[in-house]
Amino acid sequence: MRFHPIKLLAAAIFGLAIVSGSFAMAADQAQDNSKDGTKIATKAKAQPAKSLRDLLADWGVTFSATYIAETFGNVSGGIRRGTIFTGRLDLGMDLDLEKVMGWSGAKFHANMYQINGQGLSRDYIGNLMLVSGVEALPATRLYELWIEQALYNGKLLVKIGQQASDVEFFDSKYDDLFTNSALGWPGITGINLLAGGPSPPMAVPGVRVKAYLSENITAYAAIFDGDAASPDSWQDPQIADATGLLFRVRDPAWMIGQLKYKFNVGSANLPASITGGAWKHLGDFNDQRFAAGGIPLAADPGADPQKLRGNQGIFGVYEQMLTRSSLDPDKGLAFFVRTSVSPSDRNLISFYLDGGFLLTGFSSARPDDRIGVAMTYAKISNAARQADRDVFTQTGVAIPVRDYEAVFEATYGAQLQDNWLVQPVFQYVFHPGGGAVDPLDPTQTHRIKDAAVFGFRSTMTY
């Protein structure tokens, strides 16, 4: 009999939760309250019985489950019209290792994905910045598996293991409502980095250090394995590492660092922050225009691109609350903006910009509802644009010269219950694929048409 490693992990998570809960309930039912050591029931009748979740928390075990179900359809444009359903189940477990085994300042985290359904971007639109951050090939895979140690009274945090970078690096706290993948992990890194970088659905082994330098300044630095799947594989990275269990550690490294400064603005003390950072990759990247020997790729379509050593980028993030809600001072109208640049010769995207507004606390009847509007812009690099011009020079076929891809998104998040959020979504995709040739156009002279997308997402958490 063969055992699938991901299924074993899921069983382990559930098993540990059940066993821990059993021990906790047994301990709660019997205590030693007599001098001769006789066990007697001591649960006070006036006290309400604890839930299994509370009992586990007392023992340092937290179990979580999130299911995202969504449907999207492009009503016009793209490669073809269509509607899809996508779902992702996220099962996770966190252990406070000080409570569990006396390991001071340490915690353990593991989670896994079960992804099902079809991708609208991959199969119907052809855009670079996916309509949904949930979109991925169907799989059951391990995502994160790490231990974090707190040092110097919690001022220094060191995380080691398989992890993602999108939650802490190059991020804004005001972008979580949006569904487009680029409004989570920015489009420039998701497109340019090998295998998209450590972000959903693929994390990689790495070490992250977070240091609270002062009350307002936090420094972050990390080094990750530079590729979630073999760089020599012809397969899609999600197929090459279908279970998330490759644990690659010998690829050229990807390093990233940032400094975040928090401050208040104006007499109302509106919270704001500014982040600056940079990343460096030590691996090989394909030249966007030339093959080996400096020959244009258009002159020899079968040739392999010239390899260029290393890659890098710089980025910045600014976010601020603009007004406070009269219902809750922690809510109101806020905005964010993120930008980044990378070299043209080895990257499809050389300049990136996104930003948006998030409104909360606008209704006393629905205090937890949110409204968001945002825009992303990804510029096709000059080298890639020149490669398109080379095609006309070599063949006489006037294919479109790619220029940019941009996405507008508007969404409303309705909090129906504490653990249930539903949201209608609208996106308009300008120049899908950066203005790429429509693969269904026999003349190869027309771009993929702009796409109008409507969708609905439901997120349930436990």
Image (cartoon, helix red, strand yellow):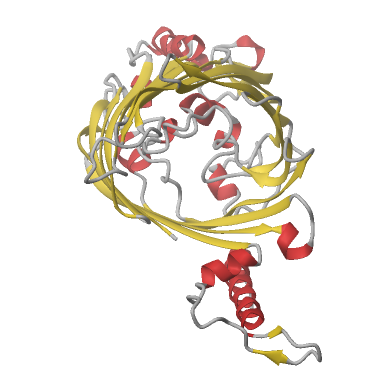
Residue at 54% across, 67% down: 54
| Quarter assignment of residue 229 | top right
Residue 207 position, x and y percent, is 73, 39
User: Is 401 on the left or on the right of 235, as rendered?
Assistant: left
196 over 54 or under it: above or below: above
Q: Quadrant of the image for the N terminus?
A: bottom right
| Quarter assignment of residue 170 | top right
User: Is 116 on the left or on the right of 306, as rendered?
Assistant: left
Visible in this render: residue 32? Answer: yes
Residue at 34% across, 42% down: 123
User: Is 84 on the left or on the right of 227, as rendered?
Assistant: left
239 over 322 or under it: above or below: below
Query: In terms of depth relative to the viewer, which is nearer, 327 or 189?
Result: 327
Residue at 32% across, 44% down: 368
| Quarter assignment of residue 410 | top left
Visible in this render: residue 436? Answer: no
State the count of labels: 0
Residue 250 position, x and y percent, is 77, 39
Residue at 60% across, 75% down: 21
Query: In terms of depth relative to the viewer, which is nearer, 159 or 46?
Result: 46
124 over 379 or under it: above or below: below
Query: In terms of depth relative to the viewer, which is nearer, 438 or 282?
Result: 282
Q: Quadrant of the image for the C terminus?
A: bottom left
Query: In terms of depth relative to the viewer, which is nearer, 184 or 400?
Result: 184
Residue 426 position, x and y percent, is 24, 35
